[in-house]
Image: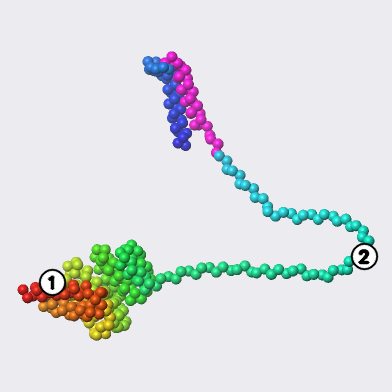
């Protein structure tokens, strides 16, 4: 359609130009003074040629165009041939007696094995909640945050029990806090605490105590970062009480011991901010004793923690003695 319009417009321009240049009619009078250069001696011929070309373009644009025909599909020839016709057999007389009748031989029986049935490939087993969380921990250590977010989304879909929901919302809080999204982190930690309290009411074992303490520590971290020191202090106090409720049963659990040491130091920092330096000093000394035992058992793993605790303790003692 666009080509037709262009052809009509060009044709009109050429036809009109030829009409004017040739001097036909009253429209051509004003063009008699136009100099056509080397074509001036042939002004009528130039005008006629331009008018003819323009008219041809208009006619070509207005004529209907033939649509291309589709190619015929190739013919399909049958692959089966007709059975050949039997040729007539002419019997000839024989002078020899006929051979004895041959014994009938049974035609061979061909056994055709049934086609093998292909079993469909078994569907891949969906990853369990524990497998997804292991993947999340590995991706977080590598800094693959995009893949870690996908693992977290899969964990949230897979979680069924209150314990799994408490874990996944605590991990969501840790992830959001690492990205600086404090509002999302606070919301996730609150949800984790709610599920963890349900678990704690159902069973009062050490695992449920640590689960709730970990969620409360997240609430305390966000509250402290946002300047809500009273809320942070309450969360860390409750978390510490839960971890101490395990008594000496966690002595052989290095992870639980380190969590207790960190909890003591976080609470000590808050106490110092509130002006309770002596209380903070007692908490740091308790944390230092735990860190010392851990470092003695595994220097490579817990030695750096002991150095940090010692430096912080010395700093706090210097402030009190001055």
Left or right, 151 with reference to 57: left
Which tag, 2 or 1, sits closer to the chain's start? 2
Name the residue located 37 percent from the left edge and 68 percent from the top edge: 154
Tag of residue 209: none
Q: Is residue 60 magenta?
A: yes
Tag of residue 273: 1
Characterize the local packing of mark 2: few (<14), some (14-19) or many (20 or more) Cα atoms within 10 angstroms.
Answer: few
Q: Where residue 244 sits: x, y (%)?
A: 22, 82
Name the residue located 51 percent from the left edge and 30 percent from the top edge: 60
**Residue 91 visible, this orientation:** yes
**Colour mapping used in the image:** rainbow
Left or right, 292 with reference to 116: left
Label 2 SS: loop
Name the residue located 45 percent from the left edge and 36 percent from the top edge: 2
**Residue linked to disc 2:** 97
- Height in image: 61 above or below 118? above
Characterize the local packing of mark 1: few (<14), some (14-19) or many (20 or more) Cα atoms within 10 angstroms.
Answer: few
Label 1 SS: helix
Name the residue located 18 percent from the left edge and 80 percent from the top edge: 289
Left or right, 264 with reference to 82: left
Q: Is residue 65 magenta?
A: yes
Q: Where residue 255 sits: x, y (%)?
A: 27, 77
Residue at the extreme left: 322
Q: Which residues are the magenta region?
A: 40-67
Residue at the extreme bottom: 248
**Residue 235 visible, this orientation:** no
Q: Where residue 124 sits: x, y (%)?
A: 46, 69
Main SS, magenta region, reads helix
Residue 29's quadrant in the figure? top left
């Amino acid at each position: 359609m666009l080509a037709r319009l262009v052809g009509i417009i060009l044709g009109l321009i050429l036809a009109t130009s030829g009409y004017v240049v040739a001097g036909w009619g009253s429209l051509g009078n004003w063009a008699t003074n136009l100099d056509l250069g080397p074509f001036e001696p042939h002004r009528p011929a130039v005008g006629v040629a331009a008018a003819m070309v323009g008219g041809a373009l208009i006619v070509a644009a207005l004529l209907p165009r033939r649509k291309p025909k589709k190619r015929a599909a190739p013919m399909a020839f049958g692959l089966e041939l007709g059975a050949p016709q039997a040729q007539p057999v002419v019997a000839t007389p024989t002078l020899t007696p006929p051979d004895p009748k041959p014994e009938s031989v049974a035609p061979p029986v061909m056994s055709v094995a049934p086609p093998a049935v292909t079993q469909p490939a078994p569907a891949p087993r969906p990853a369990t909640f524990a497998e997804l969380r292991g993947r999340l921990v590995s991706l977080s250590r590598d800094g693959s945050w995009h893949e870690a977010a996908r693992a977290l989304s899969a964990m949230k879909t897979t979680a069924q029990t209150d314990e799994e929901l408490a874990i996944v919302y605590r991990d969501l809080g840790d992830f959001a806090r690492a990205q600086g999204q404090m509002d999302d982190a606070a919301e996730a930690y609150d949800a984790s605490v709610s599920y963890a309290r349900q678990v704690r009411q159902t069973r009062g074992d050490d695992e449920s105590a640590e689960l709730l303490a970990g969620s409360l520590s997240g609430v305390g971290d966000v509250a402290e970062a946002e300047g809500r020191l009273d809320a942070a202090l309450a969360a860390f106090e409750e978390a510490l009480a839960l971890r101490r409720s395990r008594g000496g049963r966690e002595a052989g659990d290095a992870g639980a011991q380190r969590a207790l040491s960190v909890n003591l130091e976080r609470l000590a920092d808050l106490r110092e901010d509130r002006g309770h330096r002596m209380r903070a000093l007692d908490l740091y000394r308790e944390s230092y004793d735990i860190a010392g035992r851990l470092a003695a058992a595994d220097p490579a793993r817990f030695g750096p923690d002991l150095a940090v605790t010692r430096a912080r303790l010395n700093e706090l003692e210097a402030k009190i003695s001055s």
